[in-house]
Image: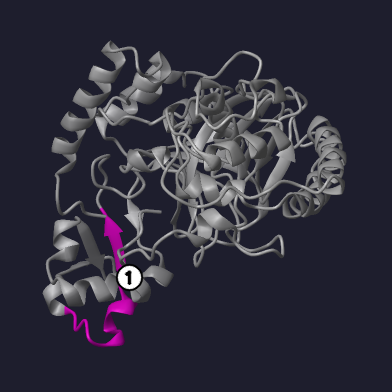
Amino acid sequence: MRDTNVSRSSRRLLLGAAMGALALAGLIPLAARAADADGQAEWPQSYEASPRMAIERESTPILSAATVDATQAAIQKYQDIVTRGGWSAVPPGADLRIGSKGARVQALRLRLVASGDLDAEAGAGPVYDSFVEAAVKRFQARHGLSQTGAVGEGTIAELNVSAAARLQQLETNIVRLKTFSGDLGQRYVVANIPAAEVETVENGVVYSHHAAGVGKIDRQSPIMQTRATEINFNPFWTVPPSLIKKDLIPKMKADPNYLTDEKIRIFNGKGEEVSPTSINWNTEEATHFKYRQDTGADLNSLGIVRINIPNPYGVYMHDTPSKGIFGDDFRFVSSGCIRVQDVRDYVAWLLKDNPGWGRDQIDEVIRSGQRLDVKLTQPVNVYWVYITAWATPDGVVQFRPDVYQRDGSGPGPLASAVPAQPMAIPQE
């Protein structure tokens, strides 16, 4: 939870200066310059390419009959690709980018043509030109990668997944999609865990997209159906019992000032505050207390807001002080809860049927720091799903890593490449 190298305030100044410079230079779109009221950039992901090959922001819900039909068409397309022999691998090596030349670039061109990311008319020469860069961005967008236009280790790994494996992925996921192709409600939320994305849907059309942080491989977000019922503004964070032994006790053994530094208070069964020095951290004594972190957007693990979604797993959706995760390709970072990008907009949409709760009112209560709970006048259906492959009506086929190994084919190259993380109390 702590940044031992750069303070949050310093990091914000550096981030704001960097993004401001890029914006003035015209190197990032206007949408990517937005920051919340506390100055933290939300790191929206964007994609630019030629109009013909660009992947537009999708308005068709991932859980819809239209997605089922498009995915069925994609299965037929990939069956044809497999029948024709699939595609050849791109040899590993140094990163490829604009100006690169050689046989590896030629192999990359052929691979991108085979999957429809590069027009065959663009040629099969050995030069990495702007056509190849645009095709690489398109490929990266379809696989949930940052659209850099350069081919590094992560992109190579995804390129070299066989066509047969991709076909199997589509065939596995169309079964999941069909399960949710009925009436899901007039307004509902879908959290697609492998994509680490949340979308809100209203009257059959996607209203908003949000990057998300979801459960780690060893602390998975559950697949479930529930409803959003209540918004907690400026919430306390109570450390879940499962994390007391896994994370909190080891952290206290390593640093006796940890709880004090993180503004986590200890309470006994009578609700009385207890000093950390009164507890023997080398025994099970610490598990008999409640641990609660003070409110505050800069510190509290839940950030400025928590969305209650009653369920037997004890998980919920919420803000986070660590906005930088939303710019990462790999966002499997929580202990099961889901962190939501642009959470203020998300909450405003959830509360749209509550009189007097527009964006201005939401911003004001957050600025005040006041603890406030607001029940939704109309609870909203929420679906946490596991979809690693699907297609959209415009023919774009999307793939995401099977991080929880539920497709039966391993975790995928992106998940396999993630290094082990140092232990810390997770920010849910």
Tell me the quarter of the image containing the N terminus: bottom left
Q: Position of residue 54 (x, y in %)?
A: 61, 20
Residue drawn at (12%, 66%) of the image: 257
The answer to if 111 sits in the magenta stretch is: no
Q: From this viewpoint, is residue 298 visible? A: yes
Q: Which residue shows up at 18% across the image and 41% down it?
A: 8
Q: How is the image coloured?
A: one colour
Q: Tell me if residue 50 comes above or below residue 146 in the rendering.
A: above
Q: Is residue 71 left or right of residue 89?
A: right
Q: Taking the image as drawn, is residue 193 in sight?
A: no
Q: Quadrant of residue 363?
A: top left
Q: Is residue 358 left or right of residue 380?
A: left
Task: Answer with left or right where residue 95 lies relative to residue 167.
Answer: left
Magenta span has 292? yes
Q: Nearer the viewer, residue 247 or 141?
A: 141
Q: Residue at x 28, y 65 (%)?
A: 271
Q: Amino acid at mark 1?
A: Asp
Instruction: Examine the image and state in which quarter residue 413 appears.
Output: bottom right
Is residue 254 placed above or below 207 in the rendered structure? below
Q: Position of residue 150 (x, y in %)?
A: 45, 35
User: What quarter of the picture does the C terminus occupy?
Assistant: bottom left
The residue singled out by tag 1 in the image is 247
Viewer-nearest residue: 224 or 115:
115
* Pointer 1 local density, CA inside 10 Å: few below 14, some 14–19, many at least 20: some
Region rendered in magenta: 279-293
SS under mark 1: helix
Q: Which quadrant of the structure image shows residue 222?
A: bottom right
